[in-house]
């Protein structure tokens, strides 16, 4: 019973963290893009009066969501009503389910009880994530098809082709990572990165697999359908792509899915390549510095430090993706396919071969 | 797997599998097929075959069915009116289905009756390690032959596509 309650609490905690971060990213994206482009950005409904710089918090985090969720629920004429309504939900469920296998800390020891800071410890964790990511495409395809709009249909078709294409380099880059760490369990991969190379450098995944990191990052951004890979929505060609005919709460759900996908990519990059929840030199009982100093810490402090480190890393990679989104122009469709099939797939295959060779030699 | 879980899963599985064939709209048929594959993955989960369940979703629900939908949308297939269904096809389906039911009946009669005692699973059953070990030792030859077969199919598709263009 207690075990069940703990698992339930962890799951709810992960869910709330992700949903809140998704909302927060909306603010980062709108205000961040304004800063990048030297605009003022969202500046209405300030609560703090005349600060020197209006943060636009009420605007993006309160006023906009209220507006979106109170709008009329509109289904275009001739559209498939059931699927039009279901599509945003089908898009949302798998991306929310992804997070339960991402570890956000090592273990928390309270008395006799050892609580792993991960909602579900799956032996096939990485495969589970690939499965959920591959299901994400249905929301896009069905949204595009059910709208009875040719732009939306084109967006849906583009989305399905793009996401299938980029799943392959994504999976292949993960194969190299799995070969390095010898496990599909994300918690074990995170733990393995706590070792030190030569007693000084933390053995984070990026040091072993720099190429896989670049491939995974590119494929991840392509999977989340953001610039430079946002061909499924391409405003200049397809109005808004697969969600052209969506408004109000359903459109807000699609936007939320977009931001949650950013968090997924950030969380996976952190876990696989940047040590996950590892803080350098921090072991379960405190800091062990290479020059011999030992600072013992209670389990709760260690757990808080780890969760804090994980959150910071995830926030950094979310920010990085938003910066990329507002820096680069959009690919052309043939360039997108060429990059995926002729660039990333051969590169990731070569990376797998090289990893195998190096593992055999050393 | 106890009887309650089995029937709680089997009933919806049969319903959605029937809907794949019965529903007139190709898109809905494809979606029901996705649901069928999904429920099958749940079956594998209950049988402790976690890796097979994950692969079932990645390969079938996540990739192959997306391609199905892609093709349906690309060709813009519409809902098929009943009258257009061909007579001969219906007759062939009736004969084929009849033979299948007969075979199932014969098979069911040969099954042992009564509960078979539950056997303990070997340690690590269904994990990636256990499955890969079997694949690369006992089943190495079939495994490699299958991959060559897939390669041949891929090359064949490319050759056919090139000849057309």
Image (cartoon, coloured by chain):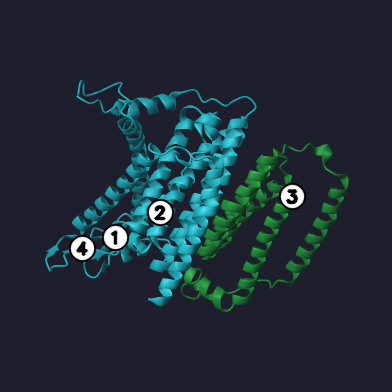
Q: Secondary structure at mark 3?
A: helix
Q: Nearer the viewer, mark 2 or mark 4?
A: 2
Secondary structure of residue under mark 2: helix
Residue A148 occupies quadrant? top right
Q: Does the CB distance between marks 3 and 4 fall below 8 Å?
A: no
- Label pair 2/3, CB-CB below 8 angstroms: no
Q: In this structure image, what is the colour of chain B?
A: green
Quadrant in which the N terminus of chain B appears: bottom right
Q: Which residue occupies 46% across, 44% down?
A: A224
Which residue in the structure is indicated by mark 4? Answer: A281
Characterize the local packing of mark 3: few (<14), some (14-19) or many (20 or more) Cα atoms within 10 angstroms: few
Mark 1 highlights which residue?
A106
Tell me, yes or no, whether dots 2 and 4 are on the same chain. Answer: yes
Mark 4 vs 1, N-terminal side: 1
Say what secondary structure mark 4 lies in: loop
* Label 3 chain ID: B
In 3D space, how far apart are the residues under numbered discs 2 and 4 (Cα atoms)? 26 Å
Residue that numbered label 3 is attached to = B164
CA gap, disc 1 and disc 2 = 26 Å
Say which element carries label 1.
Answer: loop
Total count of labels: 4
Q: Position of residue A298 (x, y in %)?
A: 17, 60
Q: Which mark is residue A214?
A: 2
């Amino acid at each position: 019973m207690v075990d069940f309650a703990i698992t339930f609490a962890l799951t709810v905690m992960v869910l709330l963290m992700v949903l809140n971060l998704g909302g927060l990213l909306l603010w980062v994206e709108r205000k961040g893009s304004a800063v990048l482009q030297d605009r003022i950005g969202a500046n209405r409904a300030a609560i703090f009066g005349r600060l020197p710089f209006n943060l636009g918090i009420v605007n993006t985090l309160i006023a906009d969501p209220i507006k979106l969720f109170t709008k009329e629920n509109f289904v275009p004429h001739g559209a498939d009503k059931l699927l039009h309504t279901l599509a945003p939900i089908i898009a949302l469920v798998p991306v929310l389910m992804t997070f339960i296998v991402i570890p956000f800390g090592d273990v928390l020891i309270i008395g006799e009880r050892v609580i792993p800071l991960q909602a579900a410890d799956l032996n096939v964790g990485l495969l589970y994530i690939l499965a959920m990511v591959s299901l994400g495409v249905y929301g896009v395809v069905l949204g595009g098809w059910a709208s009875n709009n040719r732009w939306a249909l084109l967006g849906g078709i583009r989305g399905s082709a793009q996401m299938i294409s980029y799943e392959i380099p994504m999976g292949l880059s993960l194969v190299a990572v799995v070969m390095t760490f010898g496990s599909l369990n994300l918690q074990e991969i995170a733990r393995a990165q706590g070792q030190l190379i030569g007693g000084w450098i933390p053995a984070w995944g990026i040091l072993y697999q720099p190429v896989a990191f670049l491939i995974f990052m590119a494929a991840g951004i392509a999977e989340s359908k953001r610039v430079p890979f946002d061909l499924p929505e391409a405003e200049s060609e397809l109005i808004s792509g697969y969600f052209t005919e969506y408004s109000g709460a359903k459109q807000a759900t699609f936007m939320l899915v977009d931001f949650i996908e950013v968090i997924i990519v950030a969380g996976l990059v952190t876990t696989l390549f940047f040590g996950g929840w590892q803080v350098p030199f921090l072991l379960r009982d405190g800091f062990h510095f290479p020059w011999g100093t030992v600072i013992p810490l209670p389990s709760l402090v260690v757990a808080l430090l780890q969760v804090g480190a994980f959150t910071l890393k995830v926030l950094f990679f979310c920010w990085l993706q938003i910066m990329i989104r507002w820096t680069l122009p959009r690919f052309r469709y043939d360039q997108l396919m060429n990059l995926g099939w002729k660039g990333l797939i051969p590169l990731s295959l070569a990376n797998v071969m090289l990893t195998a060779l190096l593992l055999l030699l050393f | 797997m106890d009887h309650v879980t089995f029937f709680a899963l089997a009933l919806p599985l049969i319903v959605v599998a029937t809907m794949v064939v019965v529903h007139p709209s190709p898109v809905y048929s494809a979606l029901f097929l996705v649901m069928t594959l999904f429920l099958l993955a749940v079956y594998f989960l209950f049988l402790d075959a976690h890796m097979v369940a994950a692969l079932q979703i990645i390969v079938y629900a996540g990739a192959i069915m997306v391609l199905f939908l892609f093709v349906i949308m690309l060709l813009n297939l519409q809902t098929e009116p009943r009258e257009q269904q061909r007579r001969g096809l219906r007759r062939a389906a009736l004969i084929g289905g009849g033979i299948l039911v007969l075979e199932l009946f014969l098979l069911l009669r040969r099954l042992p009756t009564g509960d078979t005692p539950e056997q303990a699973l070997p340690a690590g059953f269904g994990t990636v390690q256990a499955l890969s070990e079997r694949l690369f030792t006992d089943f190495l030859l079939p495994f490699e032959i299958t991959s060559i077969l897939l390669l041949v199919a891929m090359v064949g598709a490319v050759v056919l596509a090139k000849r057309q263009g």
